[in-house]
Amino acid sequence: MKRIASILALAAIVATAMGLGMKDELNAKLSNTYTEPNPVNINGTINVWIHAHTHDDPGWLVKADQYYVKQVRYILDTVIGALALNPARKFTYVEQGFFQRWWREQDEHVKALVHKLVDNGQFEFNMGGWVMSDEAAANYEDIINEMTLGAKFIYDEFGVRPTVAWSIDPFGHSKEVEAMYAAMGFDAFGINRVHYADKEQRTKNQKLEFVWRGSASEGAKSDMFIHMMDNHYCSPKECDFFSNSSGDCMYWKDDNEWFQDNAELPTFKVNMEEKAQAFVNMVKTRATYYDNGNNLLITWGCDFTFLSAPVSYDNMDKLIKYVNANEERFGVHVQYAVFSDYIKAVHQHKKQWDVYEGDFMPYASDPDAYWTGYYTSRGRTKGISRRVMNELAAAELYLSLAKVYELPVDLPAVFDKVMKLRKAEGEFQHHDAITGTEKQAVADDYTVQMEDGSFFANEATATVLGAILNVRLTHNLTLAWEQMDKGKLLGAVLVNDQAQALHTVVRAVVPVSALEVTDARGNALPFQINAIPDWSVERANGTHVVYVEVTVPALGFTTVYFSPRMTAATVPRGGIARDDFIENEAYRLTFENGALATVELKKEGVVVPFTDSLLQYEGRFGNSRSSGAYSFIPARNEPDAVAEKAELTVVKGELVEEARLVYRAGYQEVLRLYRAAGELGEVIEVVHDMGPTDDGREIIARFASPFLKNGRVIHTDGNGLEDIERVYREDPVMPVSANYYPISNRVWMAGEEHDLRLSVVVDRAHGVASVVDGALEVMLKRRTLGDDWFGVDEPLKENDHYQQTMWLHLGAKKAAVALHKRLDTMLTHRPVDFFFVGEARVAKGEASLLKKDLPANVQLMNFQLNALADNDYLLRFHHRFMKGEETELASVVSFDVNDYLDGFKVTEMKEYGLSGMFSREQIDKERMTWDINPAMKQEVEETVDEGTKVTLGPMAFKTYRVKVAH
């Protein structure tokens, strides 16, 4: 009882200070059941829905822990107390990472109180994700994982399904995120940061609410109702009963900010009529922006508001009471609401809603500020996030296998280690984390959290995999080499978490120049050793890099063995050649004056003029707004070359040929071709090894060919899902930054007059553009001299030395479609490696969980144990291709799970929504439908699968809870 007493006492102290006192019949009022809202709409009365909320960033200006300790815990404490004082009050909360931390600190009495508040509709979980994720740089796998992580707790603890979501602070909105939220079963989605000109037009034409069709492939299945905020998510000044600068109304400086109705306090002006009239005037103005049956949502709150919730609520109580007492005169009725209350009211308004099929990228807050810099900001941490996403996928798989096969491991310890990375990677999807729009100290903290989570998750995988192989594994190659003695073998166990076998070339940095490389059976493998140049960041970990061509089974592993040789005479190694070209079976790249000049497509017999330039824009800095973490604002529209000429070194071997270009210190690039079988032989690998770079410069790689001219049209992925056509937009103020778009995984462009397509796959999020016809530019790294005035208040000073990898494919348009998606998967889900040192090979150095590969268009995203106590597993599939793509893989695919699994089988299988917590049956029964423009109506084709059969249409997700037996 101590905890609940302290929360209610805090509320009572604040309330008593205002003459309120504790409610005597608190428990009786809390027991009242929640009833559906009954909108008052008599004679044109405007129904105002006061939506109390706080927006709590898990890291931005200070670290997440600091926000929690200094603000969030007290916000939740005082809000719960304030809601308990008056059952009419309501509140919405989003960030599960914070809420669950607070929940773990509460005693059973507080938890019981919160359960009552949830049950009677006073406290609503909006969205239910671990964070409010970014919508530009975040990958779909990470977004789904963090939403699953949050929803799991809500489902287990409260048994409720969040029906609405809002994304009020991310900087632009992705249609792919909307489509994923539709697949999770949400009724409606709230958005905010939309290009200022678009929002102005929608406001003028009463088009702020509509139905968004997020997926061209899924069609009407992806429809969801959208509420776009007409202004911003913070309180209007007419009812801002907080101080937004401090979040605490106790520190108001102006006595007139209080809603004062007590004439016996001569120090205070009685201001009821004045403040009510100002509020009503604001309402009547904003109500004209919407055509929804006289309903108006007023967002009441802001960043970290409600530190003194009873004070704020008391003032709003008075305002509501006064306006409603004068409802006939004012023509306004006011009530507290959560977002779902408002959506239910609007849903009662019979209207055919417009359907929107585009997205809301890029975001511009004004003509001088396109928020397109954050697509690239802090590339190092973006790269770490992508790497640990892959490591988490492997850890989840082996955690599940540990339970399925009852392996001799400490399962609770393994689960806890995996959970550390779930939380760290989930938190990093926050819209001020992966975006690179946080202060440097906060970015450093995110890095620490992700690397710690990576360490523990890899330990978990190593533990389970080690139990299978009966060896002790480490993820640390340097540590493994230190344990090497003469006559021993170093085993590298390569894990493939994807459901198709992976034929690739793996690389490892080693401290020796001579090795012998064999496979799990002792057969020699194709390999090559290259010396690492002094300028490379990899030189800190070794002197040479070894490349090995290998096949890793689907959902399985294989083992590669290294044994040091005493002599280097017969070791396949790359040597410096006096050539101006590199080649393999697919390409011949020719260089002139230290720069790429042509690419010969050997199979097509075509020589393509093609350049690869390393350039940099000067970021604006001075009296006007500077280029900063959020916005890309070039001082001039033309970038400069980073150097007059690069120094070219060509290195050739039997497996790898590469061209090393040194422009100057800090600016290095490698173009690499593999003489390997399979898809990797179709790749031009481009590695930028850079840092430190110039202050105030924003570096790009520009790939150009006259054969690619098409009027400056490119196709970018949305969060790694569907490709979106981007047509050059004429912008008189910001012609460059207005044409930058985000990519998570890939981008492509095709020539208009030539059968040529350039496809690019990346290992982290970037900003991309085509501002010169026939050229695609990828922004690589940003350093700014100033701040762009959007809150961070410090320049972006990323000065780290790190590598970034891109895979390019140049070839005929149709042949590129399927290959592009396959390369995307190969680069995103590279094998995760583990090492051991021993005198002999393991008994079974290669295995797969599948009898055969899943169809090539199917991704098995998750085989996941959500909680240690669960007796089922989350099984999630995704169709990789879009409807209408020029490949036979862009078609419906059906398969039976048990036809593929080897070693265990699925015994029970039930479909759920995308987050995996709420059954598809429940969602289909409860989810709202919205009447739309007849021209946009589509028949929704629903496939009912029986038993363990799965049917996937293009771009579809299907999520199941399954039980297994072995």
Image (cartoon, rainbow, N blue to C red):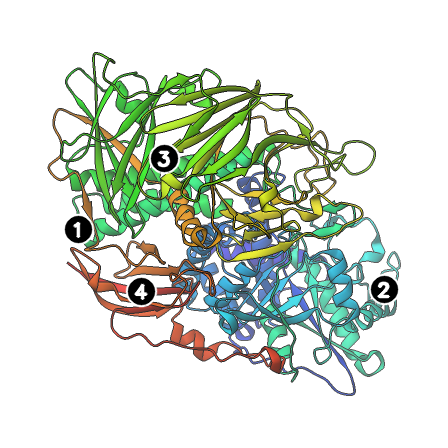
Q: Which mark is residue 264?
A: 2
| Element at label 4 | strand
Q: Mark 1, mark 2: which one is toward the viewer?
A: 1
Q: Which mark is residue 406?
A: 1
Find residue 404 and report its horizontal and vertical position in percent.
Answer: 20, 54
Residue 631 vertical placement versus 560 (above, below): below
Find residue 868 and report its horizontal and vertical position in percent.
Answer: 29, 53
Residue type marked 3: Phe
The answer to which of 55 and 134 lies nearer the viewer is 134
Residue type marked 2: Glu
Residue at (34% x, 38% y) in the render = 456
Labels 3 and 1: the sequence-earlier one: 1
**On the picture, is 429 further left or further right than 158?**
right
Labels 1 and 2: the sequence-earlier one: 2
Labels 4 and 3: the sequence-earlier one: 3
Query: What residue sits right under mark 4 in the picture?
Result: 961
Residue at (22% x, 43% y) in the render = 410
